[in-house]
Amino acid sequence: MKRFFLSLSYFLSIFMLSGCWDRVEVNDIAIITATAIDLTEDNQIKVTAQVFIPRALSGGGGLGTGGGDLTLTRKGTGSNLADAVSKLQMVLPRTIFWGQCKVFIFGMGLAENGIREQLDFLVRHPEPRGRAFMFVSKADTEKVLQLLPPLERYSGEVLKELLDFNIGLSVTMKDLDLMLTSDAQNAVLPLIKVYPPNKGKMENESIPYISGSAIFSKDKMIGTIGEYETRGIMWIKNMLKDSTISFKAGNEGEEISVSPVQSNVKLKPRISKDKWKMTIKVQAEGDVVQNETKLNLMDPETIKRLENDFEKNIKHRIQAAINPLQNEFNIDIINFATEFHHHYPKEWKKVKNRWNEMFPQVEVIVDVDAYIRRPGYTSTPSGLPKNEVKK
Amino acid sequence: MVRRVKNLLKTKHINLSHSATQKKPSDKQATLTYTINENIEYFRSIYANCSDVVFRPILIGGVIQAYLLYIDGLANVEEADEQILNPLMNSSAKNTNEMMNMLENKIPVTNLRKLSTLPECIDSISTGNPLLLCDGINIGYSLCLAKWEKRAIGEPTAEVGIKGPREGFTETINVSTSQLRRIIKSPSLKMEELFIGQLTKTKVVISYIEGIANHNLIEEVHNRLERIKIDGILDSGYIEELIEDHPYSPFPQILSTERPDVVCSNLLEGRVAILVDGTPFVIIAPTTFFSLLQSHEDYYQRFPISSAVRWLRYLFLIISVLLPSLYVAILTFHHEMVPTALLLSVAASREAVPFPALVEALMMEVTFEALREAGIRLPKQVGAAVSIVGALVIGQAAVQAGLVSAPMVIVVAITGIASFMIPRYAMGIGFRILRFPIIFLAGALGLLGVMMGIIAIIVHLSTIRSFGVPYLSPLAPLKGSELKDTLIRAPWWKLKTRPHLTGEYNKNRQSPGLKPDPSKGGE
């Protein structure tokens, strides 16, 4: 009995001790849903946070938004990100909570100036997620966060959901960190723009969307590429899981669309007689979803021909992405460095320090194996008399 | 302070035994005398102020003075009139010898016992058997005519089921033993009786199957029962607490049931049942953690369903212990663990709540426990009021009042349901109580605290034993083949051996190859 009381008093003393030191009620945290980091005109770091307003969601017990804005934005400015965040806390009555922030947006200004110093705060701090997504914004970052998307609850959610469709590169904080420390030391981040609002709507009733990518040499942004080239990069990085591809069928003027295209890409580096070669082996297959031509897709011969055209199209897409990288930016963001390092460590050591000069000279061979598996629910082109169907 | 209480208890115990001995006949060997008046005088002094004890003077054959002693309501009066008073009064016996001859040969009573000592006579009267005392002999006749009002055998109310026998034990021990005997007809079903309680003299029967139950276990049960020196036993719960291995543990270490089929299944597995007069609850030792999580119906339903139900039970056991504490821990320490959309909803519904999650959880859990307890104790007429109020307290009204958040209500409700999933009430209540310290730990240390709580419980569970059997067996110590009746409920034709540790003495319970098959007959 004595022992029981003794152990009970030990147990109760937990509550008198510092036991609850990091206890924070949900009511006392400011849940950050998206963050933008940018550079001000006088070279200060400005952090804008999109904060969730719980009261806006309550009322109907979680049903419906109840009319008011779901989020608010607050900003802090300081000499670096940590300082800016502490300034941000000064204007937020609740403890800043990064744990649910899955979207970080770098402003153009900061990106061009170098993101490494500020990324350090995000990686070092225990709260921000390693799997948060990173973006570069062409538009004013503050405006992006202030957008009121008509469909989703807040703009951060829009960006996160858009990434699910594989339409742009999705780069997490961990990926970015790895890219910057990889052999090539370059990075690529998705670029976002603001979709122009529909007529008669307020300026901020719109969404941010992903359009192309921002190319980083080391941690400094040096340029952008468009959507077509971005998708080429995604092909090479094997990030494209299912997509729709339309291509011109042979001599016909019309197109055939194939979706979903399942693809598998392998990089095969080779060095022979000081000639560096990279073979990009692509395997792709898909089903026809639209046939504009008059071709009969039930004919194996036709399909074989179409597969050829399909291959050519993919090849073109990949080359379109490699061209600007090799000729314009001279930058390797497609893992060539890592591949060469893995397969030819000795040779790699020699070019390690001048890889950016070496990269444009690498000969790229694109080898595509594409198949059209199923013609879809109809055999002949729909709405076409039988005698007009071509072989 | 503790010592003082102990001392107080000691002196009280001495007082009690002292007063008890006063009422008892001064000498255990005291015998009846030849003079009826002397005997009657003695009984009158013993049963002073006992208005329910009847002294009926009669004259046998109009000559010999005699008395019939019985307790009103415990003896079958009609039978006594018909079978005893009638022949006695009309008999022609003139002297003691003739009378004794007549008593032993002409009284149509199945069980007639001759008693010579006073304590025996008192026991006979107390159990309801009328005592016949005659002048001129120092022997009392105990007539087996005890009969009292008893409850009819009914459906066991605390252990209901869909399939399986529908009879439960009653308060009368010989009805209970007869129920067991009706299931297990073999003479190797043994029933050893002993009496516990200095005042209640409660009959306790130790039942086991010879050849299956381990001798050491039977002996151990005997030893533990014989240790008990107490004024009275009103329920098997007394005995349970007095013989269990770990008196401070929140978990029951002895299974308590009111179903004869459950008792018999345990007897067949080599365990020992202890039946106590005056209560329908029979206790069974030894028992394990997992057998307390099993329901009788597991064995009557088809085995895939039983296995699934068992898993469901294990899952909800964990929920019943951990859900509120996990909720508190995650909401006060680990906000990043919740999916964003869920956290936003929870944050929104918590916005108006003025209490920390810990206080909220404790408040609701305590209220729920209060409602449960009130619901059990209340008379049926008032019971409806409790459920109405309960629905208000744990429900929409509480949420609308802004006192608790809607997710908390759901957590408490699920936890409540979960704790009722445990088929043994004593087990369920043990876990219900443990929930509270873990909520405290969660509120103080977060998931770390929850983990500490879990570890503490598991350490405790793996430490305790019930009559020598490790509580967590067959999981710890692990015995792979025994998991057939723990992890799943294997089909009957696979349950070939009795559980080891209790059934080791006589392993096989069925002949091999019982798996049904079209080729194995029927046609």
Image (cartoon, helix red, strand yellow):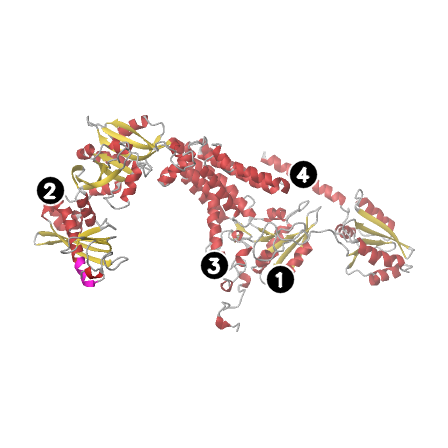
Do callouts 1 and 4 point to residues on the same chain?
yes
User: In the drawing, does residue A129 fall left or right of residue B439?
Assistant: left
Specify the quadrant that holds the C terminus of chain A. Answer: bottom left
Of the two numbered discs 3 and 4 in the rendering, the one whose residue sits closer to the viewer: 3
Of the two numbered discs 3 and 1 in the rendering, the one whose residue sits closer to the viewer: 3
User: In the drawing, does residue B391 fall left or right of residue A386?
Assistant: right
Q: Which amino acid does label 1 sit on?
A: Ile
| Residue drawn 47% across the image and 32% down it | B402
Q: Earlier in the sequence, mark 1 or mark 4?
A: 4
Measure how far apart labels 2 and 4 are at the Cα level.
101 Å
**Chain name for mark 2:** A
- The one nearer the camera, A153 or B98, is A153
**Chain name for mark 3:** B
Q: What stretch is highlighted in magenta?
A: A299-307
**In the rendered image, which quarter is residue B10 located in?**
top right
The residue that disc 1 covers is B184
Q: Which amino acid does label 4 sit on?
A: Lys
Measure how far apart labels 3 and 4 are at the Cα level.
56 Å
**Res A131 visible:** no
The residue that disc 2 covers is A328
Q: Earlier in the sequence, mark 3 or mark 4?
A: 4
**Chain name for mark 4:** B
Measure how far apart labels 3 and 2 are at the Cα level.
67 Å
Q: Which amino acid does label 3 sit on?
A: Pro
